[in-house]
Image (tube, grey):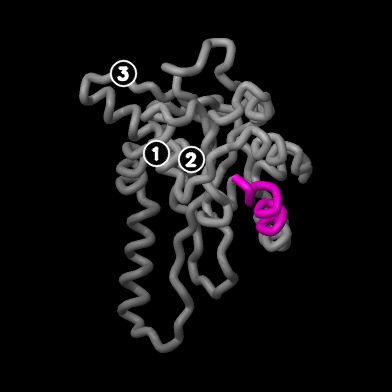
Amino acid sequence: MVLVSMFALVGCGAYTNDVATEDNNVDNVKKDEISTSWTDLKKPHWNNRLAIPDATQSVTALAITSGIEQIFNYDWAFFEAVSSNNAMLLKSNSQVAEKAKNGEVDAGFLPHDGVLRSINKDKKDGIESPLKIVWPKEGAISIQRPIGIIANESRPNENTVLSAEFIDFILSTEAQEIMSKFGFISVRTDVKLPKGVPNDVHSTVVDWEHASENEENTRSTYEKIMGGN
């Protein structure tokens, strides 16, 4: 799920999971600098070396922000430190990976799937990727992607039936295995984790009710802290 306005759904269900993690450019990061914790990104040696997706520009970034809030018991000290480290704010998650890969920054956080695809593409091309995924010890952040049929009494019944059949396919083993090849974590227990995602990875599930109720406060506090970046 991501944070969206409330509307009526029929047959709503998550079809894949993203996990927000940290990524490091190992070509530029010393071994003892590689972060193992969200807290590590508060350290001053990351000054001018971080990039993060902007929660005012991306709903996924807003969901990640809500998850980090939750991990730190709704204390904003993490973002205050990241802001003090002059983190680069980017409009999309993919830009974070791109900036890290080309050496403009050395670390950041974003959903794991894009980083996995970049690493796997480099491997296929015979290139050793400079990117490394770090699974924070406090827990990566699990973000579900919802799918559903919007309630509409004027819709022809055959269209509703076709939509339901499509959702059934998306949730099928066949479709979920395809998504897994692109790095997404399936909602099915009979589909293996994507290569590169450890079986014992610990994740934090966002409290979506709290996140929804406090969305405006999260947005305004984030903008106040990170606005100068």
**Mark 3: which secondary structure?**
loop
Dots 2 and 1: beta carbons under 8 Å? yes
The residue that label 1 is drawn on is 114
Q: In the displayed structure, would residue 10 be above or below residue 214? A: below
Give the quadrant of residue 208: bottom right
SS label for mark 2 = strand
Front residue of this view, candidates 163 and 3: 3
Identify which amino acid the numbered label 1 is placed on.
Answer: Gly
Packing grade of label 2 (10 A; few <14, some 14-19, many >=20) is many
Q: Quadrant of the N terminus?
A: bottom right
Q: Earlier in the sequence, mark 1 or mark 3?
A: 1
Q: Is residue 160 magenta?
A: no
In this rendering, position of residue 30 left or right of residue 116? right
Q: Residues within 10 Å of mark 3 (few under 14, many from 20)?
A: few
Query: Residue 119 appears in which quarter of the rendering?
Result: top left
Q: Which residue is mark 2?
A: 111
Q: Which residue is mark 3?
A: 128
Quadrant of the image for the C terminus?
A: top right
Q: Which x, y percent locates residue 140? A: 59, 34
Which residues, given as a range, are shown in magenta? 218-229
- Residue at far left of view: 125
Marks 1 and 3 close (CB-CB < 8 Å): no
The residue shown at (46%, 74%) is: 150
- Distance from the alpha carbon under mark 2 to that under mark 3: 21 Å
Q: Amino acid at mark 2?
A: Pro
